[in-house]
Image (spheres, grey):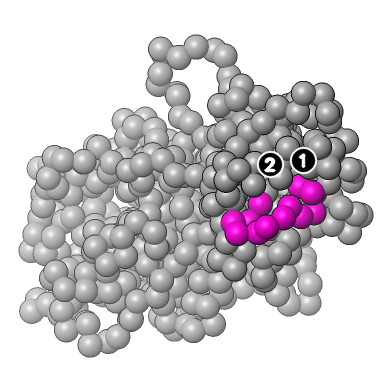
Amino acid sequence: MASVDVQVKQGRIESEADEVLVLHHYEGEAGLHDEAATVDRALEGLLRDLLKSGEFEGKNGQTVLLHTHGKIPAKRVLLVGLGKKKDAKLDTVRQAMGTVAKRVRQAGARSFTTPLHGRAIADTTGLLLAQAMVEGAILSGYHFNAYRSDLGKDSKDLTRIRIIAAGASEAAQIREGARRGLAGAEATMFVRDLCNHPSNVMTPSRIAAEAKRIGKERGVTVKVLEQRAVEKLGMGAFLGVARGSHEPPKFIILEYRGAAGRASGNGRGSKPIVLVGKTITFDTGGISLKPAENMEQMKADMTGGAEVLATIRAISRLKLPLHVIGLLPATENMPGGRAIKPGDILMTLSGKTVEVQNTDAEGRLILADGLAYATRLKPKAIIDIATLTGACAVALGQFAIGLLGNDESLKRRVQQAGLTAGERAWEMPLWEEYFEQLKSDVADMRNIGGRGGGMITAALFLSKFVGNYPWVHLDIASTDWSERERAYIPKGPTGIGTRLLLQYLLNEAER
């Protein structure tokens, strides 16, 4: 996709010349307000006529496009509905701008000018609104054509978004929000790209190559542990999953050291925040083979790792004063003559033993060693993110990330970041009673706990490898893939979880 030039300026919205001028309206509001009222006067009541006729009501996501016929410098005006004012939230603005960007492109335009939307929404700022606007507009235009030879060269991508500020103070907030919005959108699209590539391209070696490219960013260093080094460390669970594949496993370590920050000690030299991402570049289920239907989607079983990569790159480009380490145990899960079998026992890096009762519960095995390695870094906090369980989709459907953890403060901060990012996380219980389902007769634990509470038992399994460090587990198996297109979410890999991680780190940088 072509990059989008996001401009911020002070000015009078009705005086701006552009292909499309975008304004919003709340459902049920009798009159126009703010910039819409100003533009309506210049258009001699055209917008009010739309409201009176009922042609436009302001329902959430509703749009209407009209030509200005030279009454103002802009060629067209696009009205978008934000729904009822009392129900509007930050993600309403993000979704509206995703809808706007699609409608602008459908009209054959490649740029638009807009004021700040959603000032009346509670608990928001100009910065957050601008961030949401830029994210929604840019993410809605995502497409993946790397393997298509039947497409023309004419691009209909947006090239410019101009946001008009009401004054100098608002302009400063919008500029920072736009900077963050661009970083979040770029990170999410990077994840979508990695997940859209087929597994014969996006191998563990390719993931390592992508990590090394990120190692060229400011403040980032990368180390890739090859199989022999991983064997020497004693990562028996990770290596057990890798046994069936001809692709060599890679344990990838990215470290970002931001400039020294505030007295909070977030910056260089502080204890790191460690992100651990499940990076199974293709998951057949191993010997416990998955059904053939929809197995092609298992190329995206490395979404967690891709999101860690993208987050490290984004915080480097934003120059956040943080110390963050990303860990990616990368491998395929394949059947074969050397593959682990149900009943095998693996020795993990932590020294705990695991009886493998189902080789398709492989994500928790590679994460067990990744989390144990994280504890060696003496972290401030650990967050793992993984397409871990089908049980997550059964419990939460497609609109919520599963969240479990051992630290109340960390859980609340991660959950709040998800609300801000429009990537909501819902907490599930992590009660020790569920460990009864994981007890083994021949090892310290087994890797599955039966059908009941599958998301919970998977997280409880992981909890045995984080020691006493603050830890949160994010299960994105319900949100990583969409069967249909939505306002700013495409069909296929979504990248959901990326902006949650980034928002969490933005918030931590400001604590």
Q: Nearer the viewer, residue 388 or 145?
A: 145
Q: Is residue 485 magenta?
A: no
Amino acid of disc 2: Asp
Query: In the rendered image, is residue 241 in sight?
Result: yes
Say which element carries label 1: loop
Residue corresponding to mark 1: 45
Q: Nearer the viewer, residue 465 or 484?
A: 484
* Residue range corresponding to the magenta coloring: 25-37
Quadrant position of the N terminus in the picture: top right
Q: Is residue 29 magenta?
A: yes
Is 462 positioned to the left or the right of 415 in the image? Answer: left
Whether tag 1 and tag 2 are in contact, CB under 8 A, the answer is yes
> Residue 73: x and y, percent?
84, 28
Is 234 positioned to the left or the right of 107 in the image? Answer: left
> Residue 23: x and y, percent?
71, 44
Q: Residue at x 64, y 47 (%)?
A: 52
